[in-house]
């Protein structure tokens, strides 16, 4: 045992100096696929470094690992239900299920594969101990957080799979509801700017009313509540999107897993499933989006008409296809937006993580994630905005006489207003996005706690 323990120490002590530095801990953690956040490394050094010199010598390491071996054995045995001396994947999944914890199956399999050094699909106690040796605290909660991917895992591809359940939420339903709640509050707070944007987008070629003029006009004819016209439908759409996207992604993900038993889902397959789920969600919730745009723009409606009245009028006068006007550019805009948003966010997050002192990795702060999210969303919107504008113009073409389709609308906008016409309202959209993202992020944790508390009632 002492020989194995020394080998483990030497594997961390890469420069053979006789002590382990924080940078060496981080490098080894990254190699074995263990949580590589700055917080994990700092807590580990603090826990083991009894003389306070900032590094871990052999005696400190031996004392720490020896003292916790009994606890680690008890934890291992509690999962090893068949007393075989090995942990199977099924036993780990069963333990997670008994804890009532929602998991991403791919994340669990990837981490188990990293533990399983000899590749026999079983985890021995030695493999278990080696992988978890650097957890600052050892409890079932710490272990399950690692297995669920709640601590950031460096899996080599630099991307995280969608739909992770975070923040201690034990039911996917709670996560969806909390996300929708924060989105609804954020959208409601910025609803006046959204309505102004839609009205600017739907102005004719000769109309160039400014933000102040539009605001005063709405308040004068409809009152302050007119600034929130269409927000109720938008809230319903946000809630529906969360459930549809999550359910669709899970179905597609399960189909992929069943087609390749025992193999982890690749990042390309995850992105593909996420994109298909996005397309399906867009199509199913699109009628609500069309009604919202009609309400916000005022086209084909009277100020006393609500969403239900508008929907029945559209169905009677224009037929079912009216609800799907502009769906093609909406779908086309989704591809560059989703791709650029994900790529820019992940790149910025990665750059920040590697910007720690002396090249050490550090965990992104809430503010850093907010900036990364805001920047990536803006980049995605910049590329996809022309599709958004064309979609909106087609949605308000009530009699279908203004435009023959997407390409005709595109040509007429460019012919009458130039390329800049494709970005009508973009300034307002940018102004709206900043507080919307900030509000959503700021209340996300509180929304999750609120939903969790309500779920317990």
Image: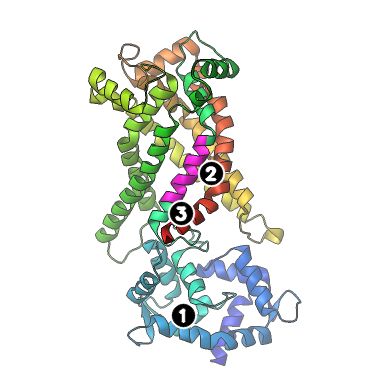
Q: Is residue 390 left or right of residue 377?
A: left
Q: Earlier in the sequence, mark 2 or mark 3?
A: 2
Proximity of marks 1 and 2: CB atoms separated by less than 8 Å: no
Please give the name of the residue rendered at 47% of the width and 63% of the height, measured from the top-left corner.
Answer: 149
Residue located beneath label 3 in the image: 451
Residue range (magenta): 177-188
Please give the name of the residue rendered at 45% of the width and 18% of the height, measured from the top-left corner.
Answer: 202
User: How many C-alpha atoms fall within 10 Å of the one at disc 2: few (<14), some, or many (≥20)?
Assistant: many
Residue located beneath label 2 in the image: 440
Please give the name of the residue rendered at 44% of the width and 56% of the height, measured from the top-left corner.
Answer: 454
Q: Position of residue 405 (x, y in %)?
A: 32, 19
Residue located beneath label 1 in the image: 127
Q: Nearer the viewer, mark 2 or mark 3?
A: 3
Q: Is residue 88 left or right of residue 131?
A: left
Residue 248 visible: yes
Magenta: main secondary structure = helix
Q: Nearer the viewer, mark 3 or mark 1?
A: 3
Q: Nearer the viewer, mark 1 or mark 2?
A: 2
């Amino acid at each position: 045992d002492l020989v194995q323990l020394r080998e483990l120490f030497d594997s961390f002590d890469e420069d053979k100096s006789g002590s382990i530095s924080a940078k060496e801990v981080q490098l080894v953690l990254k190699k074995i696929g263990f949580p590589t956040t700055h917080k994990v490394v700092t807590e580990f050094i603090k826990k083991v470094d009894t003389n306070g010199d900032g590094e871990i010598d052999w005696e400190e390491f031996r004392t720490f690992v020896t003292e916790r071996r009994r606890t680690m054995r008890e934890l291992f045995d509690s999962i090893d239900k068949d007393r075989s001396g090995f942990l199977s994947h099924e036993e780990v999944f069963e333990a997670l299920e008994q804890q009532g914890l929602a998991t991403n199956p791919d994340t669990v399999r990837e981490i188990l594969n990293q533990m399983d050094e000899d590749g026999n699909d079983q985890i021995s106690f030695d493999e278990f101990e080696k992988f978890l040796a650097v957890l600052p605290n050892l409890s079932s909660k710490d272990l399950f957080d690692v297995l669920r991917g709640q601590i950031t895992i460096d899996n080599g591809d630099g991307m995280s799979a969608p739909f992770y359940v975070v923040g201690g939420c034990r039911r996917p339903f709670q996560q969806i509801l909390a996300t929708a709640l924060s989105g609804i509050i954020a959208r409601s707070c910025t609803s006046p700017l959204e309505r102004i944007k839609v009205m600017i987008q739907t102005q004719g070629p000769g109309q160039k009313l400014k933000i102040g003029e539009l605001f005063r006009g709405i308040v004068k004819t409809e009152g302050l509540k007119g600034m929130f016209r269409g927000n109720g439908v938008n809230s319903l759409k946000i809630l529906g999107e969360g459930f549809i996207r999550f359910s669709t992604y899970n179905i597609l993900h399960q189909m992929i897993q069943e087609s390749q038993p025992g193999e982890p889902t690749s990042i390309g397959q995850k992105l593909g499933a996420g994109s298909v789920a996005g397309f399906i969600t867009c199509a199913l919730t699109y009628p609500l989006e069309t009604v919202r745009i009609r309400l916000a723009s005022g086209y084909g409606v009277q100020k006393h008409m609500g969403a239900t009245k508008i929907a029945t009028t559209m169905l009677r006068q224009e037929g079912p296809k009216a609800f799907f006007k502009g769906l093609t550019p909406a779908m086309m805009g989704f591809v560059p937006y989703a791709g650029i948003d994900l790529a820019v966010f992940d790149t910025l997050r990665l750059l920040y993580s590697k910007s720690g002192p002396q090249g050490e990795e550090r965990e992104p702060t809430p503010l850093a994630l907010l900036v990364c999210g805001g920047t990536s969303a803006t980049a995605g919107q910049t590329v996809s905005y022309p599709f958004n504008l064309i979609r909106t113009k087609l949605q308000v073409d009530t009699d279908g006489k203004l435009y023959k389709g997407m390409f005709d609308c595109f040509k007429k906008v460019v012919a009458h207003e130039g390329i800049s016409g494709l970005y009508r309202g973009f300034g307002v959209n940018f102004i709206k996005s900043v507080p919307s993202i900030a509000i959503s992020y700021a209340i996300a944790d509180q929304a999750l706690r609120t939903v969790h508390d309500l779920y317990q009632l």
